[in-house]
Image: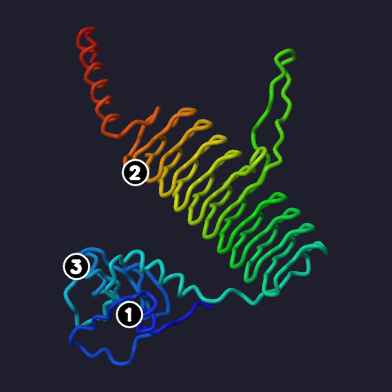
Amino acid sequence: MPATITLSQLAVNLGAEVDRGSADHGPDPVITGVSSIAAAGPGCLVFAEEEVSFAAALASSAAAVLVSGQVGAPSGSKPLLRVPQPRLAFARAAVLLRGAPPSPSIHATAVVAPGAQIAADVSIGPHAFIEEGASIGAATTIASGVVVGAGVSIGSHCRIYPRVVIYSGVTLGDRVVIHAGAVLGADGFGYVRDRASGAYTQFPQQGTLIIEDDVEVGANTTIDRGALEETRIARGTKLDNLIHIGHNCSIGRNVVIAAQTGISGSSVVGDGAVLGGQVGMGDHALIGPGVIVGGQGGILPRKKLLGPGIVFWGTPAKPVRQYLKELATLARLASKTGEKTGEK
């Protein structure tokens, strides 16, 4: 069941200033959930970041509106919660209103090895399999069909969705979310070629994968273990669906990576970087802290993109202004060439 909270309690939790205007709104409103402005009903919290959406929020059935100090004059129709970042406060309110998880239980069809260490309040769903030496921390939920390999360590308050596979020796911190179908800690794609015969032999893939606190991994994303050492996803990073991260990679703190991005082995992504959809990184490449790479950007092997806040685009990726200038030059050249040859 979703949680409920009074407006005053919510304001304290969000560090918000309550602006009730001159009207008497009666008893402290109870907030039951968050909503879009169009779908808001009684008890809903909405947010507005500019005057047009603020006017729509006031006309809605919402119980209260999150706004910044720069938006919206005090209104008699609804109480306002004033915060520096309304969208961020809205997201935090949604977490507060999510409610408690179901009562912890281990389904009768789950298989838990005798040597696994399971905290008392862990939930394990149908047909999940927990191998020897695995440990699962307090208040973590393991959904149906999950495989937790030997020696895996999962922290507290994690959510592991259906059919996730976690290979042996992987470590997950606290409050980690892994969405359905993700595979963590598989062997990296590393082979040694015999120059005489052309045959390939797998290079040892005996390292590990470490996922730090507050990381979220999207559905069907795959992250390989290190070859001899580790692959690491640092604290607070958010990975979209259908991403692949190769062996020995290091992904920094609070990185955001969109869907269908592929990162080759031994590459580094610095803290706070943002990668758009379908970005491709060659092996041993580096994206520096705070760098932004636009969709379908390509980083060649061993290349470095540096400069916090600089946007790179194209293949090979270049600063976006340079890339667009080169595109314009190429278009003019093509146009002149077409004129000379009589093409239209």
For the C terminus, the image quarter is: top left
Which residue occupies 67% across, 74% down?
Answer: 121
Q: From mark 3 to mark 1, how far is it between C-alphas?
A: 21 Å
For the residue pair 311 and 46, the one nearer the viewer reads as 311
Q: Quadrant of residue 107?
A: bottom right
Q: Is residue 120 above or below residue 318?
A: below
Residue at disc 3, secondary structure: loop
Q: Which residue is mark 3?
A: 70
For the N terminus, the image quarter is: bottom right
Find residue 148 and name its label.
none
Q: Which residue is situated farthest in the right direction here?
A: 114
Find residue 308 and name its label.
2
Which residue occupies 55% across, 76% down?
Answer: 100
Amino acid bearing label 3: Gln
Amino acid bearing label 1: Ala
Amino acid bearing label 2: Pro
Q: From mark 2 to mark 1, how far is it between C-alphas?
A: 40 Å
Which mark lies nearer to you, 3 or 2? 2
Q: Which residue is mark 1?
A: 63
Q: Earlier in the sequence, mark 3 or mark 2?
A: 3
Which residue occupies 19% across, 79% down?
Answer: 75
For the residue pair 134 and 10, the one nearer the viewer reads as 134
